[in-house]
Image (cartoon, helix red, strand yellow):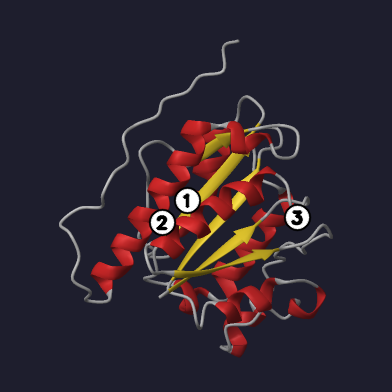
């Protein structure tokens, strides 16, 4: 079992990567392999509704040689689930990640259908839930089971590294990983518990 984690931040080692790394470490503890794939800091082309991918029938975008889209689609041949992560800009996910998500699901939908999915968003203060909802909605249209956590899959931090100080946010990432691992084991016929194990809740607020 393998989960593809997509880092949609222009900053490769920023707070989005911290959240995804927390998930990856917990998946490993649960016996599930993962890979973090950074989409880079260059533009990702938006879909122009040319429909050539459907006409060609090859699960590839015709503009795939210009960015990472077809590489992501191909990765799903060997992956059983996907989690995408993004910083929050003006209450929205990164533009590059939105372009990638729309094109990879439209052109390569056959590689994603039926596979569990989740979204993760990181913000300084507000907008995380709006961005989170935006990223989850396309998965729902592609027959992909959504994986949740003990809270919405969000964490807080502005400067690089600050997300690691969000104790509850990091626990939310670990719980998401546990839920993902449990779901995959159930889907693949592994013997497991009737419900994922939960850590003792570690609530945190930011009033100082």
Name the residue at 82% across, 59% down: 43
Mark 2 vs 1: CB contact within 8 A = yes
> Mark 2 sits on what residue?
140
Image height of 68 relative to 41, above or below: below
Q: Pick the residue in front: 5 or 160.
A: 160
Residue 195 point in image, percent of width and height: 20, 53
Name the residue at 38% across, 69% down: 31
Q: Quadrant of residue 103?
A: bottom right
Q: Who comes first in sequence, dot 1 or dot 3?
A: 3
Query: SS for tag 2?
Result: helix
Image height of 204 relative to 8, above or below: above
Mark drawn on residue 137: 1
Work out whether residue 140 can be spotted. Answer: yes
Cα separation between marks 1 and 3: 25 Å
Q: In this rendering, would 194 be left or right of 23?
A: left
Circle 3 residues within 10 Å: few <14, some 14–19, many ≥20: some
Q: Pick the residue in front: 72 or 177.
A: 177
Residue 144 point in image, percent of width and height: 39, 63
Q: Quadrant of the N terminus?
A: bottom left
Cα separation between marks 3 and 2: 27 Å
Residue 23 point in image, percent of width and height: 50, 54
Query: SS for tag 3?
Result: loop
Q: Who comes first in sequence, dot 3 or dot 2?
A: 3
> Mark 3 sits on what residue?
12
Q: Quadrant of the C terminus?
A: top right
Q: Quadrant of residue 203?
A: top left
Residue 131 point in image, percent of width and height: 58, 40
User: Which is in the foreground here, disc 3 or disc 2?
Assistant: 3
Name the residue at 72% across, 66% down: 48
Total tally of numbered discs in the picture: 3
Mark drawn on residue 18: none
Work out whether residue 138 can be spotted. Answer: no
């Amino acid at each position: 079992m393998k989960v593809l984690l997509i880092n949609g931040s222009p900053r490769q080692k920023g707070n989005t990567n911290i959240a995804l790394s927390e998930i990856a470490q917990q998946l490993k503890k649960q016996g599930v392999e993962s890979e973090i794939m950074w989409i880079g800091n260059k533009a990702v082309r938006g879909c122009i509704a040319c429909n050539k991918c459907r006409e060609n029938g090859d699960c590839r975008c015709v503009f795939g040689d210009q960015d990472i889209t077809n590489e992501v689609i191909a990765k799903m041949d060997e992956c059983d689930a996907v989690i995408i992560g993004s910083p929050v800009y003006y209450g929205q996910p990164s533009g590059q990640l939105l372009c990638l998500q729309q094109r990879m699901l439209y052109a390569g939908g056959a590689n994603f259908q039926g596979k569990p999915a989740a979204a993760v968003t990181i913000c300084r203060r507000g907008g995380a839930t709006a961005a989170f909802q935006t990223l989850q909605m396309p998965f729902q249209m592609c027959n992909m089971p959504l994986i949740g956590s003990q809270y919405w899959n969000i964490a807080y931090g502005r400067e690089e590294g600050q997300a690691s100080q969000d104790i509850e946010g990091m626990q939310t990432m670990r719980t998401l990983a546990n839920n993902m691992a449990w779901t995959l084991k159930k889907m693949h016929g592994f013997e497991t518990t009737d419900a994922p194990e939960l850590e003792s809740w570690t609530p945190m607020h930011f009033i100082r």
